[in-house]
Amino acid sequence: MLRPRLCIGMSLAPTWLSGEGWRAEDSGIEGLYSSDFALTIARRAEAAHLDFAFRPDASFLPVEVLEQSFGFSSLDPTLMMAALTRETSRIGLVTTISTTFGHPYTAARQMMSLHWLSQGRSGWNVVTALQGNENFGLRDMPASDDRYDRAEEFTRVVQRLWQSFPDEALLVDRASGRYADTDLILPIDHHGNDFSVKGPLNIPRFPGPRPALMQAGGSPRGIDFAAQMADMVFGLSADRTSALTQRKALTDRARAHGRDPAEVRFLPGLSLYLGATRAEARALFMDTHARVTRPQRIERVQAATGLDLADWAPDRPITPADLPRDTPRTGQYARLLQLIDSEAPTLAQLLDCPETLASFHWQVIGTVDDAVAEITDWFRAGAIDGFIAVPGGSWQSFELTLSELVPRLAEAGLFRQAYSADTLMGHLQEDSPGPARAAGRM
Ligand SMILES: Cc1cc2nc3c(=O)[nH]c(=O)nc-3n(C[C@H](O)[C@H](O)[C@H](O)COP(=O)(O)O)c2cc1C
């Protein structure tokens, strides 16, 4: 069931400005809270024919982080996407709305509004969120299962609201004076555990493919939820084995829910520190993480290895024999453990290498060639259907992603050379083998 082409999104969260990245002369950080900032990125991503631009989001602010970086401070993602609608014409625009803190009527209205404004290019990243309860009158964060129960009900209500005012109901008949056929505009009369919503929605359905749905979350319950309703999954896979495992779990759960697994595209985040040489990319990565303290680094190595390193001499090598038996070699610390297996670095070396500081996302620190090779390998292995690019380190790393990496993937036949559709579901289905095409309409 190999897909002919990759699906590629670009994160508008300015990951290339995080760490020390914002301090570079040309970072453009002063524009962070302007629409021009996001627009520049979205236009560049559209010129590279990407499927979508995407804004993750959080509804809380860890203030201490702001001493050193912009942290989670950002414009509201849905308003930001609305500002991009008239300035772009083909690229999908995926916003994030939390089902734990929001209300389905508001979300249905915002998403259908974004869909009309963008003429069919909107997408909704459905998140259950990890923090932020104190901003919404909740003493504690609800348990994961409760959040997913609410997310399932929330999403079903949104989907029903989108259908409650069908576009066919619009008559706009000047001669007869009939604006709409009200027999077709029906309440949904939903009474569930978390919501009571009468409906109908106060915006007609967009006459074309529906908004695309993305899900972010990787627990078995999260995967099951995605397998029921998502067109895309924003995943967290630091290594190929974990990606294969998640892709397989999605396939199994999609089949169990009677869906074609190809309809659920698995797109891990891909952190890209790109340079003209590997040494340059590595230096960019290390410079970006210069202010990560020694205790923070030690904590990371301890978490990965299960070793208490408090009394270790800096020149003491860490060898595979030091690791507790059955330390798993896959997951978020895969690269660090692979380094211990292959090179037995000293503690000092380990504290000063990219593997220790690496993102929990899939990460390539290297040249464009390295990135092309790894993406091709994961894609051909059936571990991914595409990725969401989260370039890191510098504006140049962002530029290399769009001006060199994506064109190289297109030249290799792994990505489109030009858009053939005008809507986000259209872009997604262009690459779907078989029956997934029928699913675009509500
Ligand atoms: C790759 C990834 C991206 C996420 N992005 C967001 C986000 O932008 N906003 C948010 O509130 N939560 C985000 N989450 C949190 C999830 O919505 C979810 O609450 C969390 O992962 C717990 O669910 P899980 O146990 O199924 O992973 C993200 C999770 C993952 C794995």
Image: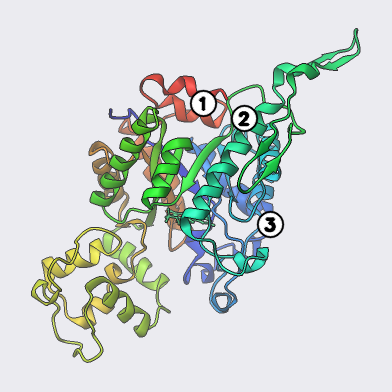
Other residues around mark 3 within 10 Å, as few (<14) / some (14–19) / many (≥20) = few
Q: Amino acid at mark 2?
A: Gly
Answer with mark 1 or mark 3, whichever residue precedes in sequence: 3
Name the side, left or right, on which 128 lies relative to 198. Answer: left
- Viewer-proximal residue among 110 and 141: 141
Label 1 – label 2 distance at C-alpha: 9 Å
Find disc 2 in the rendering and name its residue: 120
Looking at the picture, how far across and down is residue 315, in whole percent? Answer: 16, 87
Q: Residue at x 77, y 17 (%)?
A: 183
Looking at the picture, how far across and down is residue 147, in whole percent? Answer: 52, 54
Find disc 3 in the rendering and name its residue: 34
In the rendered view, tell whether residue 34 sits above or below residue 53: below
In the rendered view, tell whether residue 38 sits above or below residue 202: below
Q: Amino acid at mark 1?
A: Gly
In the rendered view, tell whether residue 381 sits above or below residue 166: below
Tell whether circle 2 marks a residue whose Cβ is less than 8 angstroms from ligand 1: no
Looking at the picture, how far across and down is residue 203, in whole percent? Answer: 75, 31
Q: Residue at x 37, y 63 (%)?
A: 359
Tag 1 secondary structure: helix
Looking at the picture, how far across and down is residue 212, in whole percent? Answer: 54, 35
Q: Residue at x 8, y 74 (%)?
A: 321
Residue 132: name its quadrant.
bottom right
Answer with mark 3 or mark 2, whichever residue precedes in sequence: 3
Find disc 1 in the rendering and name its residue: 426
Answer with mark 1 or mark 2, whichever residue precedes in sequence: 2
Label 3 – label 2 distance at C-alpha: 24 Å
Q: Are the residues at dot 1 and dot 2 in contact (C-beta closer than 8 Å)?
A: yes
Q: Amino acid at mark 3?
A: Ser
